[in-house]
Image: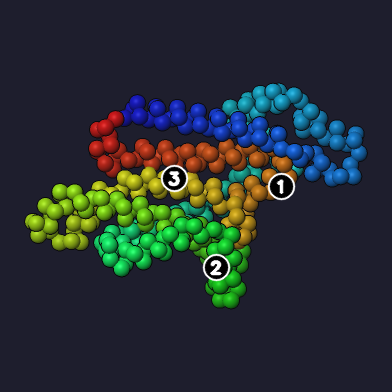
């Protein structure tokens, strides 16, 4: 188990290093200039050169990268090129909104998807299973830029049940969380259905039925616990994906989270903020994957024994 943890942590560190380096060079090679965005087209050459020197954008690329690497090691990404505030403070202000949104979406998708997957598995090869397959296929490819405006128009404008934009209240998180949860719930449901159907074919299931164990108990006490490994792994991956994939949803519902902050920073070519956010998103996604991978042995001893 210890070697498994060390191996996963080393993979985590290497992947994060490669991702952050790629983001640094890609952002610097973008054709637009943050100095021109900040000062505008009518700024003089002297003003542009002065600001470029102040922001240290006049340094050679290797020097900028060494400064970036040093700041990353210190966990201090510096200041925003646009607002002048510390990047850490910008992220600190926006992170709670994205975290609440991601947790709400994860809970909705896990419960809804889990219930639908269990229903489909119990009705395998019947009408209910076919309906689940059709609905989940549509849900899985439903883009947030389409479902978001539809739900916003239906339940915030025509039927004003929820706020139009994110005002920080619990009610304001439901619609954007639902938009994020729709494709995730279909994925959860499909994973659980496949896992349950595979477990149903194993000998211990037939043995339990021969002993007269009620079907409900067979599912809850035997099939469901043995089907949780892929479900938990998907939960870790989906949590990271929900946190990092909320850019469009946050813009639609005006949630001042990390997604909105990233969109703003990309538009203004705010290099320190862009890089810090991408590193944070990568860390969240990798951490979710790592957590799911390390929790799996605790749920199923067979995984632990295989290490």
To which residue does mark 3 refer?
Answer: 237
Q: Are marks 3 and 2 in contact (CB under 8 Å)?
A: no
Left or right position of 193 against 235: left
Q: Residue at x 26, y 54 (%)?
A: 197
- The N terminus: image quadrant: top left
Above or below, comparing residue 24 to residue 187 in the picture: above
To which residue does mark 1 refer?
Answer: 267
Q: Secondary structure at mark 1?
A: helix
- On the image, the x and y values in percent for residue 69 come to 62, 26
Q: Secondary structure at mark 2?
A: helix
Image quarter of residue 10:
top left
To which residue does mark 2 refer?
Answer: 151
Q: Neighbour class for label 3 at 10 Å: few (<14), some, many (≥20)?
A: many
Q: Neighbour class for label 2 at 10 Å: few (<14), some, many (≥20)?
A: some
- On the image, the x and y values in percent for residue 275 come to 63, 37
Name which of mark 1 and mark 3 comes first in the sequence: 3
Q: Neighbour class for label 1 at 10 Å: few (<14), some, many (≥20)?
A: few
């Amino acid at each position: 188990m210890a070697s498994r943890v060390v191996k996963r942590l080393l993979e985590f560190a290497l992947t994060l290093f490669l991702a952050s380096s790629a983001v640094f060079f890609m952002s610097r090679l973008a054709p637009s200039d943050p100095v021109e965005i900040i000062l505008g087209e009518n700024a003089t050459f002297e003003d542009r050169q002065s600001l470029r020197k102040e922001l240290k954008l006049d340094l050679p690329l290797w020097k900028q990268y060494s400064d970036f690497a040093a700041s990353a090691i210190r966990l201090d990404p510096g200041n925003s090129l646009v607002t002048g505030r510390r990047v850490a403070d910008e992220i600190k202000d926006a992170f709670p909104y994205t975290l609440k949104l991601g947790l709400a979406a994860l809970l909705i998708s896990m419960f809804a998807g889990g219930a639908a997957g269990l229903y489909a598995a119990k009705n395998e090869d019947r009408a209910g299973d076919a309906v689940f397959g059709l609905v989940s296929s549509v849900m899985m490819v439903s883009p947030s830029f389409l479902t978001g405006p539809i739900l916003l128009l239906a339940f915030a404008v025509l039927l004003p049940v929820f706020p139009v934009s994110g005002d920080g209240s619990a009610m304001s998180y439901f619609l954007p969380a639902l938009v994020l949860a729709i494709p995730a719930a279909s994925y959860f449901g499909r994973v659980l259905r496949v896992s349950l159907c595979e477990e149903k074919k194993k000998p211990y299931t037939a043995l339990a039925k021969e002993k007269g164990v009620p079907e409900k108990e067979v599912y809850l006490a035997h099939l469901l616990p043995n089907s949780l490994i892929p479900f938990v792994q998907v939960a870790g991956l989906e949590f990271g994906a929900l946190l990092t994939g909320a850019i469009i949803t946050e813009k639609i519902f005006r949630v001042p989270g990390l997604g909105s902050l990233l969109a703003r920073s990309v538009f203004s070519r705010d290099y320190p903020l862009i890089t810090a956010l991408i590193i944070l998103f990568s860390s969240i996604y990798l951490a979710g994957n790592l957590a799911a991978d390390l929790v799996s042995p605790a749920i199923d001893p067979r995984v632990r024994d295989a290490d």
